[in-house]
Image (spheres, helix red, strand yellow):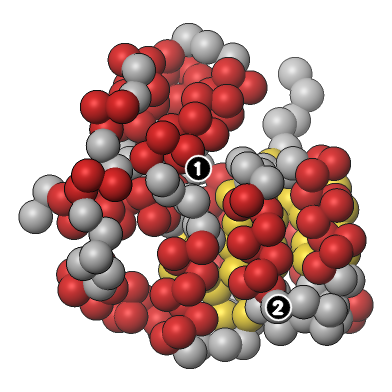
């Protein structure tokens, strides 16, 4: 049986860094880089073309801010898991990334083996967060945007099938595992997830999971 890869798009304006990441990912036969971009405009185009499983995105880009790229990708309903991979540990960047639709936030000084582990975790549907900034996320989950009220995220708007998928999503299951659990094809899962995000006004699994955990407190 053919090896199943998790496909990855790199968006970073430093060629040497992209090459290093690509070489690192190349050591893992479960991961496959299918595209790379040195500009935001090119990155958005490649994301639309390939819709990879994972997008690794820098914040500090020459032509446009990475958070703006993230906003564009989510506005276009790109279903890829998106990891911010940056040198910035600024609280404003972290919270903005979360609210804009990031599925993970990692710092570039992390160990190579930890980076690969994070890619596998995010491919499985988990939220990934650098240990050095996890306290900021915990504070946000506990005390964060209280203006986000439950009526904005009414799960009753979902169809029975969408509710099934919603509860699997907040448990951290990947698209592949959801498809297996419900005996449907993965492409159908992706369509349902887009509908769920639209109906509940979420931009990412991370944002939805944070809200779900808060609502259970």
The image quadrant where one finds the C terminus is bottom left
Q: Is residue 23 visible?
A: no
Residue 59 falls in which quadrant of the image? Answer: bottom right
Which residue sits at x=78%, y=24%?
A: 2
In the image, is 109 to the left or to the right of 133? Answer: right
Which residue sits at x=20%, y=48%?
A: 150
Relative to the observer, which residue lies in front, 105 or 199? 199
Residue on which disc 2 sits: 65
Crowd around label 2: few <14 · some 14–19 · many ≥20 (10 Å): some
In the image, is 5 to the left or to the right of 162? Answer: right
Relative to the observer, which residue lies in front, 27 or 89? 89
Quick one: SS at disc 1? loop
Q: Position of residue 34 (x, y in %)?
A: 85, 48
Q: Position of residue 213 (x, y in %)?
A: 21, 52
Residue on which disc 1 sits: 124
In the image, is 161 to the left or to the right of 52? Answer: left
């Amino acid at each position: 049986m053919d090896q199943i890869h998790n496909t990855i798009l790199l968006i970073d304006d430093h060629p040497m860094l992209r090459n290093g990441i690509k070489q690192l990912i190349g050591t893992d036969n479960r991961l496959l880089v299918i595209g790379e971009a040195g500009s935001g405009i090119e990155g958005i185009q490649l994301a639309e073309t390939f819709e990879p499983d994972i997008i690794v995105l820098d914040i500090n880009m020459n032509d446009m801010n990475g958070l703006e790229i993230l906003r564009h990708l989510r506005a276009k309903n790109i279903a890829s898991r998106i990891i911010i991979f940056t040198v910035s540990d600024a609280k404003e960047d972290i919270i903005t990334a979360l609210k804009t639709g990031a599925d993970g936030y990692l710092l570039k000084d992390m160990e190579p083996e930890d980076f690969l582990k994070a890619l596998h975790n995010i491919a499985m549907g988990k939220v990934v967060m650098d240990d050095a900034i996890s306290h900021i996320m915990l504070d946000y989950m506990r005390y964060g945007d209280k203006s986000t009220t439950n009526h904005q995220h009414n799960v009753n708007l979902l169809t029975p099938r969408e509710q099934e998928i919603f509860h699997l999503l907040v448990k951290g299951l990947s698209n592949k595992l959801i498809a297996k659990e419900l005996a449907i094809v993965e492409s159908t899962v992706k369509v349902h997830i887009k509908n769920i995000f639209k109906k509940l006004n979420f931009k990412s699994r991370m944002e939805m999971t944070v809200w779900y955990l808060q609502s259970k407190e």
